Amino acid sequence: MYFRFMCLRKSIIKLALLLFMVFNATIALNAQTNFSFETFEGSSLPLVLISTSDTIVDEPRVIADMKIINHEGGMNHPDDEPTDYEGRISIEIRGATSQSFPKRSFSLETQDYLGNNNNVSLLGMPEENDWILYGPYSDKTMMRNAIIYGLGERIDRYTVRRRYCELFINENYRGVYLLMESVKRDENRVDIAKLLPSDTIGDELTGGYILKIDRMVVEENGWRSDHPSIDGGSVWIQLCKPKGPDLHPAQRTYIEEHIGMFENLLVGDDFSDPSSGYSQFIDVQSFVDLSLANELSKNIDGYRLSTFFFKEKDSDGGKIVMGPWWDYNLALGNADFCDAAIPEGYVVDTDCGATNPTWFERLRSDASYEELMRSTWRVYRSDVWSNYSIDLMIDSLAKVLSEPQKRDHVRWPRLGQYVWPNPFVGEDFDEEVQFLRDWLDARLIWLDQQFGLTPMDNPSQPPLNPYPQPTQGLFRIRGNLELVSLRFYDIMGRIVDEKQHLYSYQTIDIQHLPNGMYVIECTLLDGQTATTKLLKSN
């Protein structure tokens, strides 16, 4: 009898859960259809309208029609006449991890009516035929990539051009997207000479290659480096362009051997020799700039994934150049693993950093390279990467997204919810943007200290190690310290809490404080003071 009762009870629970899921799905579906062509009230962003009779998948591409509506300075409506483009495209789902999210990103090619490549200008960007529709999802601010690409432009690095837009597919509203350039050889993109299959000897063979460090996808398009990562694992180098039928075996052999010579030189005793060392192989400033971008954003995928570089012809300098910068959606404090949410620490010192190729750490062991990093940081921070300049950029992006983000978050409800791998869950868009600001402010303070812009904290102060980091509100101070009091400051320098009459290993409660970054000032029994930072997130 008891067994039957328990089975019945379980069935009722399952039925209730099923009904709950159906109810929630109905709510979500209703929310998604709130923005049909008929009810959509218009957007200040350009509208991209795609229609197809096929299901869009990750290979092969399917044929579709695309219209772009963009009334600069005005409102755009789905039933307006196209202004930027009306024609045929081929389209497919793109991305790796991002394909697990319901909001998908897409690659597309503009074509003529016969299916040939059709180079066109979209939303003011230079003419080309390969484009990306990137749909931010786990980055609820929808601006992390835009911020880093913008910082790259400010130091005259080519980063992919992009425009925010709102997307409809078959009259189904899909949310806020970035229409972006793809990484491609072109005089307006990666500006290197075109490498033809017939270019197999002499100077013509030596350049026109685009590569990246990333996961292994197709072995024919890359190779494992002979030199392991920092932790001894494999480093995979992909040859992006040319590839397939456009790649001659002699070209594959040349570029693999050339990269191998650079790697062999790096592990040699004379790698830093001014006349015969690494500077003969690489554009040193491009390596420095990529490192600074990865460290500013604490990009835990930096160096080991989506790390593009290219090789010029010898007659054009012949150097290996880092870039374009790519994929920063998990950067700027937006990951809950590998200490990514903690503003202090270099990427290489995290668990993720251990899987990096050894290139960048080896370069930093050279005093002249390290000094170039420090001096470059100071120059950038004095102007185009100043706090004021970055704050204005975030202000501008937040203003552009203020209304469109509301529709996106209705279409894809995730505010106030954990989405992998968020370390912080804001209740609204403003909280998400504020967390980004606070995290970046703290990160810049720490990096300024490392690169000599501000005096380091007193090196004799006792180490303070709050854990867990980040905390949901309850934490301890690791170490046998005789605590007297703690004072908590918010990111604006205001005292927001104080704790008195403490003892070692006491659990400290700040659950009442809002999520964000805090500076803790600790007074010890012997009169010493020490400071540290703590991130509260739940």
Image (cartoon, rainbow, N blue to C red):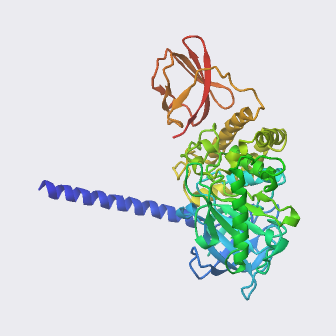
| Residue 214 vs residue 503, the one in the foreground | 214
- Image quadrant in which you'd find residue 60: bottom right
- Image quadrant in which you'd find residue 456: top right
Q: Is residue 147 above or below residue 171?
A: above
Q: Position of residue 56 (x, y in %)?
A: 58, 76
Q: Position of residue 301 (x, y in %)?
A: 62, 53
Residue at 57% x, 73% y: name it. Answer: 58
Q: Is residue 284 left or right of residue 294?
A: right
Residue 66 visible in the shown view = no
Quarter of the image with the N terminus in it? bottom left
Q: Is residue 521 above or below residue 217?
A: above
Residue 158 visible in the shown view = yes
Q: Position of residue 156 (x, y in %)?
A: 84, 54
Residue at 66% x, 71% y: name it. Answer: 107
- Image quadrant in which you'd find residue 50: bottom right
| Residue 208 vs residue 142, the one in the foreground | 208
Q: Is residue 443 left or right of residue 57?
A: right
| Residue 273 vs residue 56, the one in the foreground | 273
Given the current orientation, which residue lies at the most extreme left position?
A: 1
Residue at 67% x, 78% y: name it. Answer: 244
Q: Is residue 188 left or right of residue 365?
A: right
Q: Is residue 101 above or below residue 353?
A: below
Q: Position of residue 289 (x, y in %)?
A: 77, 49
Given the current orientation, which residue lies at the most extreme right position?
A: 315
